Amino acid sequence: MTDKTGQDRVLIFDTTLRDGEQSPGATMSHAEKLEIAELLDEMGVDIIEAGFPIASEGDFRAVKEIAERSRDAVICGLARANLQDIDRCWEAVRHAERPRIHTFIGTSPLHRDIPKLSKDEMAERIHETVTHARNLCDNVQWSPMDATRTEWDYLKRVVEIAIKAGATTINIPDTVGYTAPVESADLIRRLIAEVPGADEIVFATHCHNDLGMATANALAAVAGGARQIECTINGLGERAGNTALEEVVMALKVRNDIMPWSTGVDSTKIMNISRKVATVSGFPVQYNKAIVGKNAFAHESGIHQDGMLKNAETFEIMRPEDIGLASTSLVLGKHSGRAALRAKLEELGYKLAENQLKDVFVRFKELADRKKEVYDEDIVALMRAGEDAANDHLVIQSLRVVCGTGGPAEAELAMTVGGAEKQATARGDGPVDATFKAVREIWPNDARLELYQVHAVTEGTDAQATVSVRLEEEGNIATGQSADTDTVVASAKAYVNALNRLIVRRGRLGQDQKEISYKDVS
Ligand code: KIV
Ligand code: ZN
């Protein structure tokens, strides 16, 4: 398939909702899955693997509803190599305008050993299951799981069987992230050259990141002839994750001179969906993650900042706007000068007169001496200091916690509720528990804590901790985040932040849950 310009088109198959959701702890709610599927469809992903219908009633419902709501994307469900799985999968995906059944079986010696199938017995099973899937649906994908550790002759044999049985896409998974780019390209090239019927179907690549080579392996497979890349947003997935969608899309865009293949993905939607997936999965994006990490468009050193202010191309190979970021983020630190501070303030919407800037610069330097890096939130907090407190209903005024060995922790909290100051003291099992109890003393609520996660931004005992808190109250979900060098303070602020969002939501009853998005959380 070629695009308008005659370039070969690579299909993007997103499996955030299936392989991504299999990451331990990354479970998403039904509503969140629907929302992510909608964003994927909107951004131009060709195929959405929406789940594993036989795995649970919830998975089935999600795949079915995503299929019913789908617009342009093919909706795919996963099924093991048995008739019951395949039937259940078809039940869920058949509601889509363009359904696909994806069935798989582990073909390497280690995986053949689990169901105790001989090579011949497994070959027969593949023939039977792919034929069954194809009788239900004219779009069938088949995967030999652990293909990269399967004997070459056997791999060739089973791929041929699956093609003859009617598979329209053959996916070659590097299930354990074991292959390397040269081998990945070679494997696809040889399959296309040697398997009868290979030129009639699409080859896909599905790479895990155990050795950090998932994206490189996927692109190499494309060089070898694969025309479908399986990937996830933020590289979410089992163990070290999968090929990241944002990485392949941007690599093909930025280096189209040496990788002349296009995708149908609108890259300007990347940042939004990356943030959404980070929020709903509870897996924050590492700061130095390619493309979507907080530092991917950030520059601290004076020389880099100076260069960036003169010509962004000096230190950036793509524009932040290309992934949907408003602009480059200059991370400020103690080496940053007044020009960088002014640029940052303007980026954040503050236009200051020279004397005001002088005053803020003094306060900024004091802060930069205490903190290694000064982030946007710090600058906003600096600007708001002295201003009338936030519009938030709940605002923490002070917090003191006593903890350690020899007794329960005790938190003493002062907080304003709608402007009125209240105080509470509470004991708990550790400082965070005591603090959350004190918040509930002042602001009683039934919100259920769904997630509490602490993420250290840097190393060392003075590291900033970013805390994420997710609360659920009568079906409404709100996430709060906060960063501080004091983990307990960050926890308290994140908790109160999430409560404030729930309060806003209550005032908007009747509106859809999806309004609470990551971009609101800072
Ligand atoms: O990694 C893998 O092998 C898979 C298959 C189910 C395609 O996710
Ligand atoms: Zn996988």
Image (tube, rainbow, N blue to C red):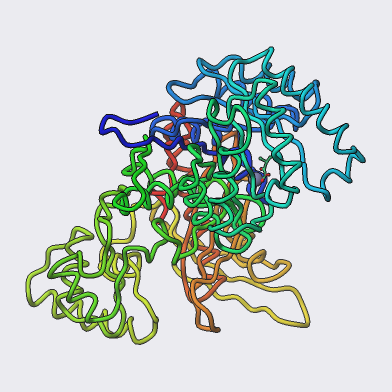
Q: Residue furthest right?
A: 116
- The quadrant of the image that shows the N terminus is top left
Q: Quadrant of residue 264?
A: top left
Tell me: residue 340, above or below residue 255. below
In percent of width and height, residue 315 lies at 25, 69
* Towards the viewer: 275 or 464: 275
Tell me: residue 170, above or below residue 344. above
Give me the residue at 62% from left, 67% from top.
425
Residue 386 visible to the viewer: no
Q: Residue furthest left?
A: 354
Total tally of numbered discs in the picture:
0
Q: Is residue 172 left or right of residue 118?
A: left
Q: Quadrant of ligand 2?
A: top right
Tell me: residue 232, above or below residue 401. above
* Towards the viewer: 113 or 30: 113
* Towards the viewer: 495 or 307: 307
- The quadrant of the image that shows the C terminus is bottom left
Give me the residue at 74% from left, 22% from top.
86
Give me the residue at 50% from left, 83% from top.
462
Q: Quadrant of residue 143?
A: top right
Give me the residue at 49% from left, 50% from top.
244
Q: Is residue 418 left or right of residue 97?
A: left
In percent of width and height, residue 130 lies at 72, 23
